[in-house]
Amino acid sequence: QVQLQESGPGLVKPSETLSLTCTVSGGSISSYYWSWIRQPPGKGLEWIGYIYMHTSGSTNYNPSLKSRVTISEDTSKNQVSLKVSSVTAADTAVYYCARGGHWDFDYWGQGTLVTVSS
Amino acid sequence: QSALTQPASVSGSPGQSITIPCTGTSSDVGGHNYVSWYQQHPGKAPKLVIYDVNNRPSGVSYRFSGSKSGNTASLTISGLQAEDEADYYCSSYTSSSTLEGSVVFGGGTKLTVL
């Protein structure tokens, strides 16, 4: 059974960089698409982007976030990471990592709340 | 890219059937068969219940079904049960913004089982 666990700081200051890690167990990250998705408190879901290991770690990002987002991988640790730069209060959300096919998500982590505040 | 349109809420009684529509455009729902549906209970991660318009993942109840007509996809839940009370989100591949495409979600629908 594949399990995903997000980790990282729960509080980030405005203008700084948000950094999260997703540790995958029960399967290798070398296959499938690995996405990050976020959900502001009380609001809907927003796809951030994915990394696809099968093609040497190619990435694809939500156009609205592309200038601030980087998704990377560490196959030796079976981890996928997310960085969002120049954060504002609008980036406050529960951040999920998820495994999927190209455009759907079949396994999700439990999510981690990141608050942007000084 | 604009979010897909879902009603804010729907309700039904146990045993009844309900349908949740998800309206997009020819760049997303209408133009591709990559519509998915997710169930989310309070405080929990979303769960995939339908993918590629009308396919159920292993372990998802047969009571969940999906369909599409034009630019509108639909999720139907038959034989409503109390445990079905949750938020439901649709998503679709969209080719509107970039060469590779991206994913757009609906705003979510709260299902209340009366």
Image (spheres, coloured by chain):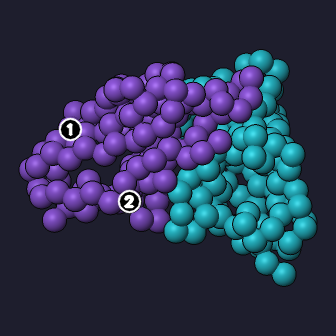
Dot 2: what SS?
loop
Nearer the observer: mark 2 or 1; the answer is 2
Q: Which chain is cyan?
A: A
Looking at numbered disc 1 in the image, what kind of residue is underneath it? Arg
Chain coloured purple in this rendering: B
- Residue to which mark 2 is pinned: B8
Report x, y in % for residue B28: 54, 30
Quadrant including the N terminus of chain B = top right
Q: Position of residue A41 (x, y in %)?
A: 57, 69
User: What kind of residue is marked 2?
Assistant: Ala
Q: Residues within 10 Å of mark 2 (few under 14, many from 20)?
A: few
Name the side, left or right, on which B73 lies relative to B17.
Answer: right
Q: Are marks 2 and 1 on the same chain?
A: yes
Q: Which residue is mark 1?
A: B63
Direction from residue A103 to residue B8 in the image, left or right: left
Q: Which badge, 2 or 1, comes first in the chain's sequence?
A: 2
| Residue placed most toward the observer, B114 or A73 | B114
